[in-house]
Image (cartoon, grey):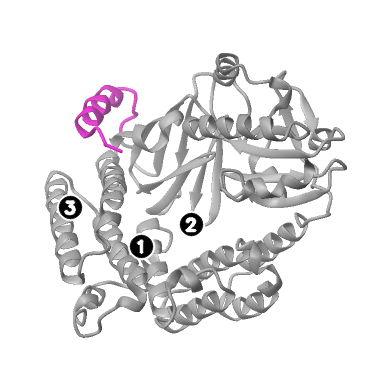
Amino acid sequence: MKYPYLLCCVVGIALLACTPSKPKSGLFLAGQILNPSSRQITLYQGDQTLDIVALDENMRFEKQYDSLVSGIYKLEHLPEYQTLLLETGDSLWVRINAAAFDESIVYSGVGASKNNFIMELFLKQEEETRFLSTKYSSSSQTFNRLLDSLVEDKKKLWIQMDSLNTLSPIAQKVTQAAYIYPYASIRERYALLRGMQWNAMEDSHYFEYRKFLSFGDTDLAYFDPYVNYVLNFISVEAQDRSLPYFQQKSTTDYNIRRLEVLDRNINGVLLRNNIARAIALEEILTFENHAQHERFLQFYATVNTSPNYLAEVLDLHTDISLMEPKKTLPEIELENTQREIVSSSLLVNGNPTVIYFWSQTQMNHYRDTLERVQQMQERYPSIRFVGICIQPFNAMVDQVHGMLEIPITDQFALVDFEKAGKAWVLTLLNKAIVLDQNGKIVEGFGNFLDSDFESLLKGFN
């Protein structure tokens, strides 16, 4: 993905006229969402929902905050989100096209430069990550030199941006972290994937970069590049080098070792609890480990000190139990193409049913999914295939269904993503649910695009 930085600046100047002047105190946040996938935005501070703001008839929102502390926030427009660095005195306008969420984000107004810089880095590094994945067979010295060069390039960009703006200490810290920690995370990932092939003599200086980094920065406890780095560091330290990484990475024993490494090495309550939560969710969502989860949860409870996180992880464990084979699919509200609210229980019509999911922001994925549906419908004519959009329907969806000649009687949308996502444990867009003719669950956690998925259907022929 390429970030049109010059275009961003031009558009930013055009939008500046729409942005209020810098407030004497507090913080002003406003914006517009093109092709919205819901009728609201949500602002998070850390792990807490700070505010939910409805979009008006022009798909705009605005809000004045008088008592926000400076730091990391997340702006969510389901199913996407991005990080914001907000400070007292900012008056920020954001423009987003939800059909191409990350690539389209443009900030203007007071506080725009630091956020545009973070966004530019995010998109550059996303593109670089794909390139670097082809270099993992290189020696550690070659790989390190390559990353050193990329870090130096981003450092020059930061120095230029810093020279043109008066950045506060927190803004300096976060914008520097935005270019330092992604590459540190890639270095850890390289070491993780080398695993058994690690040469202790050849690579003795590889980890020297760690001594310049922090493992207990509260300001960065919810900043994705920093959190990802700490998670990768923990994964490397927990690795059993006598076994291939991919053989151990999904095991309960490995995730317990990750918690042990966290307990020994990571400081700061916010960061510790956030990292422990991430590990716990990863373990609980490894459905094949379900029989081992009680053992994991007992250990997790000794490391985590957040009652809210513990309740969240335990709730997820319970929700997964309700999606086990032979159980009735939990009932949720759906919207049909006539915009009527119906019960998901109506999906059962005496035929085996496959439920697949798609998003208005991932239309290439939807087209791939529809091709798969057509292939399987030809092979399994007795099975009903039901598509569920994770956002409420709109006029754009009607046009797509008409152009592609999709049978609308088998198309529905989620009314409330959060409630439905929790009830059906919807964590991946590729998720598929298989029901028998009586509506009982055959598979609650299938991967619709996986080559093995079709084996679940052969019994229905």
On whether residue 17 falls in the magenta region, the answer is yes
Q: Which residue is mark 2?
A: 46
Q: Residues within 10 Å of mark 3 (few under 14, many from 20)?
A: some
Tell me the amino acid under the disc marked 3. Lys
Q: Residue at x 27, y 36 (%)?
A: 3
Which portion, as a residue range, is magenta? 1-21
Quadrant of image for the C terminus: top right
Q: Is 366 placed above or below 317 here?
A: above
Reading the chain from its start, which is encountered first: label 3 or label 2? 2
- The reply to whether residue 419 is visible in this rendering is no
Q: Which mark is residue 226?
A: 1
Q: Residue at x 43, y 78 (%)?
A: 239
| Relative side of 196 to 428, left or right | left
Q: Is 27 placed above or below 19 here?
A: below
Q: CA distance from mark 3 to mark 2?
A: 26 Å
Q: Please identify, in this view, whether the residue under mark 3 or under mark 2 is nearer the observer.
A: 3
Q: Residue at x 51, y 27 (%)?
A: 36
**Helix, strand or loop at disc 1?**
helix
Tell me the amino acid under the disc marked 2. Gly
